[in-house]
Amino acid sequence: MAQDKFQQEFNLNYYDNWFYDQNTGILTFSTGNQELNFRYFDVGSFSTKSNTWKWSWNNNYTLEKVKKQTKTIRDFGTKSDFPKLTDGYFESDEIEAWELTAIAFKIEKGIGVYRPVDENKLQIFLAITELIDNETAQKIKDKYVECGTHDSNRIAFVCTHLNKETKVGFNEAFETSEDMELEDDDDFQAWCNDCETIRKKEDGWTDHAIDFAKIKIVCERCYFEIKELNQ
């Protein structure tokens, strides 16, 4: 069985800690300095309190990044006239939850399944799709920042003069839109009109221009709130 092979190869029970991040789409297992990272998608959840199953595509609290694959499962259910794949929420049991996850696993060619249980005894079924090396995983994680307003979001860089209260102009390194895909080496970057004036005068980001800008880190949501203010 694929799940048995997966468990034998990676021995997840060895690790003391696990953490999955919807923003990065990474499931991490760790013990001390040892770490194991996988890409995953959220299949759905089974509630032991209500004995119900909910597909992640029907869950507003699940980010699109980790549930888009289940829409393929739903489409397969439509073509196959399989209501359990097209109904977003229904009475179920734990055995069926595993069966539905196995279907998703097979259609999306997963390599394993992990089922964490939250504080409300909600069983969350995650389909693991790929092992990624720790260096790659860390680069992905470093692209995110904890925001006091918006929680974890992609990182963005703005000059110190940009804020959510005052219009000071908004100049970008490239044209952006919210939730857009970025190349590995790209980040959201913006600066005010005064910074742009100095940058042009000095023909680029010289030490003086950088010192004037005093670049700070914000999250992606804050970035686009600032951008909207300056439109």
Image (cartoon, rainbow, N blue to C red):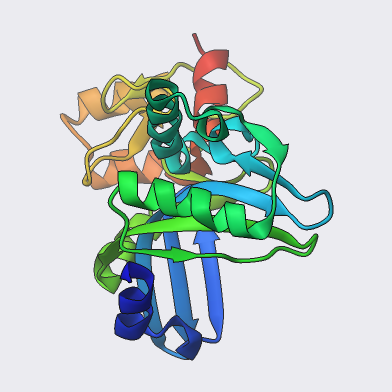
Residue 194 sits in quarter: top left
Relative to residue 19, is residue 80 depicted above or below?
Answer: above
Left or right of residue 48, residue 151 in this image: left
The image shows a total of numbered marks equal to 0
Taking 191 as reference, is 93 above or below it? below
The vertical placement of 39 against 31, above or below, is: above
Q: Nearer the viewer, residue 57 or 73?
A: 73
| Of residues 114 and 154, the one drawn nearer to the viewer in this rendering | 114
Where is residue 228 drawn, in percent x and y? 53, 15
User: Is 50 on the left-hand or right-hand side of 205?
Assistant: right
Q: Nearer the viewer, residue 91 or 202?
A: 91
Residue at image x 44%, y 81%? Answer: 12
Residue 57 picture location, percent across and down: 54, 33
Residue 35 makes an appearance in the image? yes
Image-based side of 102 in relation to 149, left or right: left
Placement of 196 over or under 129, stated as above or below:
above
Quadrant housing the N terminus: bottom left
Residue 79, image x and y in percent? 37, 22
- Residue at the location (22% across, 46% down)? 184
Q: Residue furthest front?
A: 81
In the rendered image, is residue 21 in sight? Answer: no
Q: Residue furthest right?
A: 49
Q: Residue at x 28, y 36 (%)?
A: 182
